[in-house]
Structures are given as structure tokens and as C-alpha cells.
Image (cartoon, grey):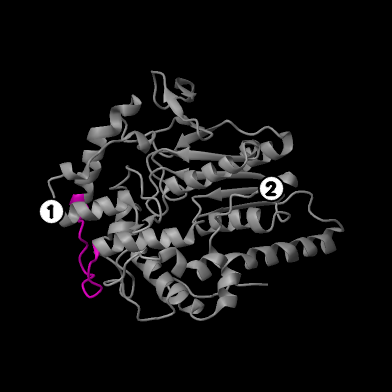
């Protein structure tokens, strides 16, 4: 058995301090070991190995899913990766970049720079500018990449605008962009910016002011800098990828080479909510673009579905109620890659299509909660 390198609860990276074995276990080896042992137990009990094996995970589980496809191509026949934290270094950089703007001093963490009212004003301004671009004013951006909202148009203090720009722009270094930023949309959603990026000012004792603060600082202290007292006030991103290289070797699942997985008949289905405030959907696009650029035929075995208005893994005003396991099973059994999935809304009823990237759902008029009123283009 394995505990993926740690037994800690909450946001605490101290288990990884100066312990590369635990880091590798957490990074990728644990799932592989459990898979091998589980298959052996199944064989001993039933007298035969499993006919098919699927892995499904979201967030860090999505990272584990991609690790399985990249490093252990024989473990699973089908892999479902939701909102994967696959670029561990990039995610840490993005979290730190936002946190340094939201909380400039690690000694003053009581009140967030952006209040709930600020986030509401921001969300309203984004929707006022871009909601109607897809033909439906429903509080959902069908594709945030079409939005041309300018944070400078906000009636807010310069430091607040700078923090907002840090979210959308992503971290940079003198040698270029380190990681993508977050797309527009969902700024005021429950479980969105408030919990992940800006903080709410209502954190429990001994809990970080935001999840970005917690994960970013803990990763740097215990996995990269190996200094429990490390602080970000004087930190800059010069040479960030180089400094992160040892940890990234164990943690990041960014390899676009899926040849071995595909040669064994493997199928990879990735899904990501456009309004995910934890992990940017743009990073999943970046990865799939790299896979397709390396081998155009990978489109037959690798599919990405972007979910408008959907938060981290699930939730939000967008259509996220879809049986992904069933879709993956049909793909596995028929060999026909899905071009479209039908997803339901959690509130208010209705459905909308999720189109396989790079296609997206185009509204053709009528009921905006009727899949037949959209086309994948």
C-alpha cells in the first residue's frame, strides 16, 4: 500500500521537506503501485486480470491521470483528467503571483485586498462587456477568449486593478511568460475567486487567507526552497523554472508524448471548466495544443471538453452534469471518439452541448438551454 507520500490533512507541505522519496511517491509512483497491486489482487481472487482499467481524477487527481498516461502507459486503457494541475511549477508560480498582489505583506493577512463587493463589481463589469457576445445574455461566457474586457475601466484603486491584472495575466519572468493566467468569468461565484485567489477575510484559525496563498507558499517552502521560513515579499520569478526543476521532475505531467499510451489503444479525455478559479482552463488548452502539434493523429485518441460557466471540477451556473465515465466507456468500446457531450444544468433544467476542442458550441437561436439550438463549429 501507499499513502502518496503523506498523511497530513489540510494545506501543509511539511511532509515533503528534504524528502525526495515522498515527493516521488506523491508525484506519480503511488498511483502506479496501487494499480499494480490492485490488479494482482483481482487476479488472485477472480482468476483473471481485469479486462479493462479506467482512471478518473480531477485537480491533483487530474494531474495523476496525466501522469499515468505519460509515465505508465500500460496501467489504464482509458484516462479521464479533470482540471489537471499538470504543470505543478506553473501553478505554483501563478498562485504566488496572485498572492503577492492580494497580500503584499505576509504580516498582514486579515483583510483581503479585493472585497466581496469588489469581486461583484468586477463580475458585473465583465458580463456587461462580454456576456452578449455569444448571443445569449445568461451570465455565462461561452468562450472567455472572445472577451476584451479591460480592467483599467474599473473604478477601483490602482493596487486593486493591478491585482486583477495579475490574475488574468499570469506570472512572467525576464525571459518570458511562466504560466497562463485565468480567463474571464466567474469572478464572484461561490467557490471561485473568493476562496481560491482573493480570499474572503473569514478564514479559520491556522488556515491560510486564500487557497492560492496556502498552496503557493507551502510548495515553495517545503518542495522547492527547503526552507520552512521562506517568504515571498522579496521573491522574484527570475530563473523560476530552473529553481523548480527538481520538484517538477517528480510532480509535473507536461510531456506531450503519448505515443506509448496510444499504441496500446489508450484514450485520454480531459475536461475543464472555463470559470475554474483554482486551475486555469487555458493551461489544459496549452497542453492539448502541444499534444496535437507533436502528432496531429493524436486527435483520434485525445479529446478536450471545455465547460462554460463551470467551476473547479464541477459546480457553477454552467452545464456540468454529464456522465463522463459513460462517454469514456462508449469511446473505449466503439473506438469512435466523442465530438460532443450533452451536459445538464444543475439549476433551472435544460442542457447544452460540450464540443470537442477546438470546436465550440455556437448558438443558432431559440432556447439557450436546448442542445438542439447549438452547433459545434
- Residue, x 24% and y 66% (percent of image)? 103
The CA distance from mark 1 to mark 2 is 50 Å
Give the magenta part as a residue range. 102-118
The answer to whether the residue labelled 1 contacts the one labelled 2, judged by CB atoms less than 8 Å apart, is no
- Residue, x 21% and y 54% (percent of image)? 162
Relative to 32, 274 lies left or right: left
Q: Is residue 27 above or below residue 231?
A: above
- Where residue 259 appears, as percent x and y from the top left, is 69, 47
Mark carried by residue 157: 1
In the rendered image, the residue lying farthest to the right is: 47
Relative to 93, 245 lies left or right: right
The secondary structure making up most of the magenta span is: loop
Residue designated by label 2: 259
- Where residue 119 appears, as percent x and y from the top left, is 23, 50
Q: Name which quarter of the figure residue 34 lies in.
A: bottom right
Mark closer to the observer (1, 2): 2
The reply to whether residue 333 is in sight is yes
Q: Secondary structure at mark 1?
A: loop
Quadrant (top left, top right, bottom left, bottom right) of the N terminus: bottom right
- Where residue 231 appears, as percent x and y from the top left, is 31, 75
Relative to 114, 260 lies left or right: right
Amino acid at each position: 500500500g501507499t499513502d502518496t507520500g503523506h498523511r497530513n490533512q489540510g494545506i501543509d507541505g511539511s511532509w515533503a521537506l528534504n524528502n525526495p522519496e515522498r515527493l516521488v511517491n506523491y508525484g506519480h509512483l503511488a498511483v502506479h503501485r496501487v494499480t499494480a497491486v490492485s490488479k494482482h489482487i483481482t487476479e488472485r481472487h477472480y482468476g483473471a486480470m481485469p479486462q479493462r482499467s479506467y482512471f478518473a481524477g480531477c485537480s491533483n487527481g487530474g494531474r495523476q491521470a496525466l501522469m499515468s498516461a505519460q509515465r505508465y502507459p500500460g496501467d489504464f486503457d482509458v484516462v479521464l483528467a479533470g482540471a489537471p494541475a499538470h504543470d505543478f511549477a506553473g501553478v505554483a508560480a501563478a498562485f504566488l503571483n496572485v498572492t503577492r498582489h492580494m497580500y503584499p505583506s505576509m504580516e498582514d493577512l486579515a483583510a483581503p485586498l479585493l472585497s466581496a463587493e469588489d469581486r461583484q463589481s468586477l463580475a458585473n463589469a465583465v458580463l456587461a462587456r462580454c456576456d452578449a457576445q455569444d448571443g445569449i445574455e445568461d451570465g455565462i461566457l461561452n468562450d472567455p477568449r472572445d472577451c476584451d474586457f479591460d480592467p483599467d475601466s474599473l473604478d477601483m484603486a490602482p493596487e486593486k486593478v493591478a491585482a486583477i491584472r495579475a490574475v488574468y495575466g499570469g506570472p512572467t519572468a525576464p525571459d518570458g511568460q511562466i504560466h497562463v493566467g485565468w480567463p474571464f468569468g466567474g469572478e464572484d461565484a461561490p467557490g471561485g475567486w473568493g476562496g481560491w485567489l482573493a480570499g474572503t477575510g473569514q478564514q479559520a484559525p491556522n488556515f491560510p487567507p486564500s487557497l492560492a496563498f496556502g498552496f503557493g507558499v507551502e510548495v515553495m517552502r517545503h518542495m522547492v526552497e527547503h526552507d520552512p521560513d521562506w517568504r515571498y515579499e522579496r521573491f522574484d520569478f527570475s530563473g523560476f523554472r530552473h529553481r523548480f526543476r527538481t520538484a517538477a521532475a517528480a510532480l509535473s505531467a507536461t510531456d506531450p508524448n503519448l505515443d506509448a499510451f496510444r499504441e496500446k489503444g489508450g484514450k485520454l479525455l480531459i475536461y475543464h471548466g472555463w470559470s475554474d478559479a483554482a486551475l486555469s482552463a487555458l493551461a489544459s488548452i496549452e497542453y492539448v495544443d502541444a499534444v496535437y502539434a507533436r502528432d496531429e493523429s493524436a486527435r483520434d485518441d485525445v479529446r478536450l471538453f471545455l465547460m462554460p460557466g463551470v467551476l473547479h471540477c464541477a459546480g457553477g451556473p454552467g452545464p456540468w452534469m454529464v456522465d463522463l465515465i459513460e462517454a469514456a466507456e462508449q469511446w473505449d468500446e466503439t473506438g469512435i471518439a466523442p465530438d460532443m457531450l450533452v451536459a445538464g444544468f444543475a439549476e433551472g433544467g435544460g442542457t447544452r452541448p460540450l464540443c470537442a476542442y477546438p470546436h465550440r458550441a455556437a448558438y443558432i437561436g431559440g432556447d439557450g438551454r436546448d442542445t438542439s439550438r447549438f452547433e459545434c463549429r
